[in-house]
Amino acid sequence: MNPVASTSALNLARKLYEAGIRNEPVLKAVANTPREQFLDPALGHKAYENTALPIGQGQTISQPYIVARMTEILLQDNPLKVLEIGTGSGYQAAILAQLVPQLCTVERIKSLQIQARQRLKRLDLHNISFKYGDGWQGWPSKGPYDAIMVTAAASSIPEALLAQLADGGVLVIPVGGETQQLLKVTRIAGKYSSEVIEMVRFVPLVNGELA
Ligand code: SAH
């Protein structure tokens, strides 16, 4: 991707630094990513505020602080192949695709997936594979993954995602109800251990039919 580095994106990266994000590649990716392109033009003026915003279909683009926080946790062991659940606007995928060699992303709402795919192509990000499907099932045929990030709130940790994690791999996932605990689950020698990162608020990881 060409460095965009608009003043607004750079200022957003500065705000995230002040909020405690210290991973330089993550801050650079935020500074290089035109978040307004992931939003309806009517919301463009809010694109560089550190807030979640609606993207249609009752879904949201996550708060930039949370995008950066989850990304820095996920990058800790330099993953090569990463799975994202909940493509949504494609913004989180744009950040990840600048930082890892291979990204796979799953979305259950077709119209959001189509838009995200177009945006990411326009930004010259070509290391992303898209699946229209149910994130509870992951994407088994492309696994195992060195890291998995779920960007919607799960009522429990999906078994399929644990199974698709490579040994030494990390799963970052919000688990709970109205508010959730952001968990970092690590797989070591076939065993899983989990750590609470902080409290978060995501839209639900829907259980059921594709939309
Ligand atoms: N990463 C996105 C966040 C979007 S919000 C971004 O940067 O914009 C969460 C997304 O998860 C929504 O697009 C929603 O449709 C999707 N989602 C919810 N349940 C899902 C499921 N079971 N499988 C796949 N995607 C799901």
Image (tube, helix red, strand yellow):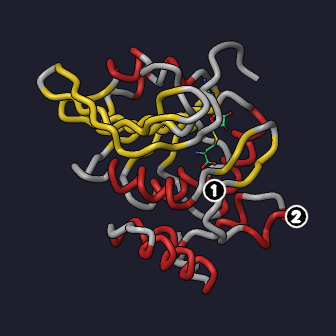
Which amino acid, mark 2?
A: Ala
Residue at x 41%, y 28% (from the top left corner): 142
Please rate how many residues cluster around mark 1, counting C-alpha atoms within 10 Å: few if below 14, some from 14 to 19, many from 20: some
From this view, report whether residue 40 is shown above or below residue 166. Answer: below
On residue 173, the disc is: none
Residue at mark 1 to residue at mark 2: CA–CA distance? 22 Å
Please rate how many residues cluster around mark 2, counting C-alpha atoms within 10 Å: few if below 14, some from 14 to 19, many from 20: few
In-front residue for pair 178/111: 178
Q: Position of residue 29 (x, y in %)?
A: 46, 68
In the picture of the structure, the residue carrying the numbered disc 2 is 42
Residue at x 25%, y 52% (from the top left corner): 76
From this view, report whether residue 19 is shown above or below residue 194. Answer: below
On residue 121, the disc is: 1
Which amino acid, mark 1?
A: Lys
Horizontal side of 123 relative to 145 (left or right) equals right
Question: Which-is-in-front pick, marks 1 and 2?
Answer: 2
Residue at disc 2, secondary structure:
helix
Residue at x 71%, y 52% (from the top left corner): 118
Q: Position of residue 38 (x, y in %)?
A: 70, 58
In the image, ligand 1 is in what quadrant? top right
From this view, report whether residue 32 is shown above or below residue 122. Answer: below
